[in-house]
Image: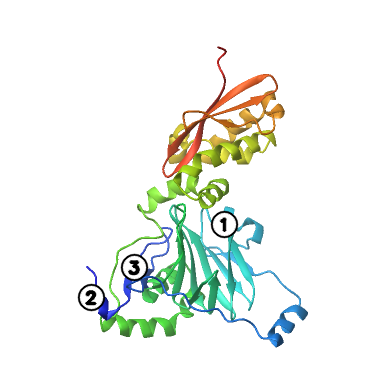
Amino acid sequence: MLFPSHLRRPMLLSAVLCGMISPALTGAADSPTTQPTTQPSSQSMTHLTTEPITPPVIQTVTGRKTVDAGDVDRALSSQWLAVDLQPGQSVSAWGAPVTANPRSTVLIGSSSEFQFCVVTAGQVRRGDLSADTGHVIFWSMKPGAKPQVLEFSGRDFQQSMRTAGRDDLADSLNSFTDSQNKRRWWGLVRPMNVNIGAPMGASVDQTRKSYLLQPEVVKIRKSARNADDIAPLTARVMLAHLKSQETDGVAQLLSPEWFLEPAKRGELDQARHAVAASLVGQSWTKNITDNSLRATDDPMRYWFSSGKQNFIMTLKPFDEMVYVLSIVPEESK
């Protein structure tokens, strides 16, 4: 049920994030509002260039373990990260930088379908979008999807932060939550029941994240202009990893269909890496002919050569991605 358009009331979007955090989100009844970003003055530019640049402080929400900026994408496949940003500092997740205007604190995370940046203090921008305290920037990983900005439920978020032992993050939202509670009482926000943190439930989402949040998979899905681009990108990236003997990259693109039981036991990575190591260890992978990859009449089959031998790479769609199902020598005619 939607409010009449002339009322232009914000809507409440419920979410359970990563099975641990359960904020609800509110957003504009129509399209998200883009807020202008302010260019720094010449004085502030001088200040930014003369002070030493330090990296942002990045920690896991639970356990407060420090994470290096280069390890953010890998860490996000399993947990949320809290990031303290000084003015002008950025943190990049999946190649999408988020930059602080004033000093800010954000939580960045991923589900099997969405990536998001929750602002608990300050103001940040991502591209043309700007988000203040109490708002979240989130974007689908489907090809061509655009990011949005919505407002989340402060009281639910605070409760989940306290449960996680992060009173510091909860307390930073006290003023926002008080204001939002009044708007809730007056009916200015309402539930939408959309779950960006675990779209299919916590246990299912955790399994899907084990293969959909692999860095190579995310890069392919984000760089694809449409669904038809995914298969050729997968074939091209897989062949590059085989030629350069990159076992980890090969493992990420192997079809999860072969590893469903290990995935249920939380052993997907180990099982895929064992198969990938065996594949990379075959002598033909060292002699793959440059630029030999060719499409066939079947959009899920690609031809390439290694030395005097030709091979067929077979792909298969699996859960909104296309993975490598098999690589076999081409049969002699």
The C terminus lies in quadrant: top right
Gap between marks 1 and 3 measured at Cα: 24 Å
Q: Say left or right for 180 vs 273.
A: left
Secondary structure beneath disc 2? Answer: loop
Q: Are marks 1 and 2 in contact (CB under 8 Å)?
A: no
Question: Measured along the vertical axis of the image, is residue 117 above or below residue 298?
Answer: below
Q: Are marks 3 and 2 in contact (CB under 8 Å)?
A: no
Per the rendering, the mark at residue 55 is none
Q: Nearer the viewer, mark 3 or mark 2?
A: 2
Gap between marks 1 and 2 measured at Cα: 37 Å
Q: Can I make out residue 265 in this image?
A: no
Amino acid type, label 1: Trp
Per the rendering, the mark at residue 94 is 1
The N terminus lies in quadrant: bottom left
Looking at marks 1 and 2 on the same chain, the residue that comes earlier in the sequence is marked by 2
Where residue 156 appears, as percent x and y from the top left, is: 37, 72
Per the rendering, the mark at residue 13 is 3
Where residue 309 appears, as percent x and y from the top left, is: 65, 19
Looking at marks 1 and 3 on the same chain, the residue that comes earlier in the sequence is marked by 3
Please give the name of the residue rendered at 23% of the width and 75% of the height, measured from the top-left corner: 4
Amino acid type, label 2: Pro
Per the rendering, the mark at residue 4 is 2
